[in-house]
Amino acid sequence: MAPLAETDDHVLAAELAAAAGEVLLGIRARVGHADGRALKDAGDQGSHEFLMAELAARRPDDAVLSEEGKDDPVRLESERVWIVDPLDGTREFSEEGRTDWAVHVALWERGRLAAGAVALPAQGRTLHTSSGPPAVVTSGDGRRPLEVPAPEPGRLRIAVSRTRPPQFVQKMAEILDAEVELVPIGSAGAKIAAVLLGDVDAYVHAGGQYEWDNAAPAAVALAAGAHASRIDGAPLTYNGKDPLLPDILVCHPLSAPMVLAGIRDVAHDLPG
């Protein structure tokens, strides 16, 4: 590991996400799956404490916004804020054999996402931004550039919630000028990773998320050349006073006009 002062933010995000993933795999093995609530709680707390300690040691002047921590208003005056989800997909983490859960580590700096990493610990890989190729995926097989694959003409696979597929996405699928398949996947990070890895073509969500749910995946998606926006096409913005960021669209830029038009056509079915 490079000396702390020499570790750039992209490397640090990837290191911390992957290392927190190792912590979570250890907790999963130690606690077991007999008591799902106990496993969820241990995972959330253990990963949060690890990330907070590492950021305090390695970036002591930066602010942190974590799903599991107190929202310190000092972040609103800070030029650098780490936005982390120590365990994205606690339900999947608590279910034996599931791999669609993640760790998110993102850096917001002076109004933009500057770095991000999404570790998929049970899959053995981490997707992250880089100072070389803009986005890469690192695994036991090494490291390769990450570019969002173009969709197959006339076909669109959309990642949706395993337990709460949004009705508006189902209705949108019926009117799009494409053969649409809805693909259930667990955490938001796993869904966006699936877009970037070519397992699905789009992720559409409306109905409640917070900045930590999508900051790191959005950072990687944008670096990989994907379209990432609110579902009305507006830019994603972070480090807001209210961390609620309820909706997101991630897809290949070629698919964005069609999906955004479909969302507009069923806007009356959107939550809230």
Image: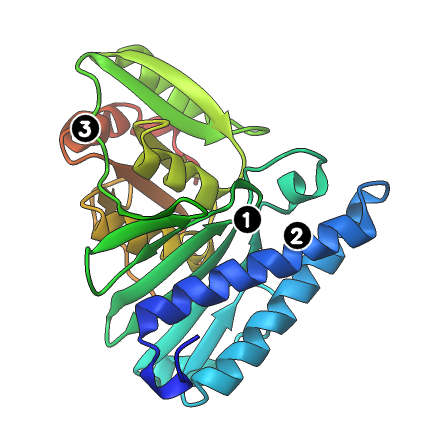
Left or right: residue 147 compared with residue 249: left
Find residue 121 and name its label: 1
Residue 162 location, quadrant:
top right
Q: Residue at point 23% right, 51% down?
A: 222
Left or right: residue 78 compared with residue 88: left
Q: Residue at point 23% right, 27% down?
A: 259
Dot 3 alpha-carbon crowd within 10 angstroms: few under 14, some 14 to 19, many 20 or more: some
Q: Where residue 195 appears, x then y in whole percent?
A: 33, 34
Residue 160 location, quadrant:
top left
Q: Please tell me which of labels 2 and 1 falls first in the chain.
A: 2
Q: Is residue 161 above or below residue 86?
A: above
Q: What residue is shown with label 2?
A: 25
Q: Nearer the viewer, mark 1 or mark 3?
A: 1
Is label 2 in contact with label 1 (beta carbons under 8 Å)?
yes
Q: Amino acid at mark 2?
A: Leu
Q: Is residue 86 above or below residue 230?
A: below
The alpha-carbon separation of the residues under discs 2 and 3 comes to 33 Å
Q: Please tell me which of labels 2 and 3 falls first in the chain.
A: 2
Q: Amino acid at mark 3?
A: Ala
Q: Where residue 22 appears, x then y in whole percent?
A: 60, 57
Furthest residue in direction right, as rendered:
34
Q: Residue at point 41% right, 80% down?
A: 75
Q: What residue is shown with label 3?
A: 150
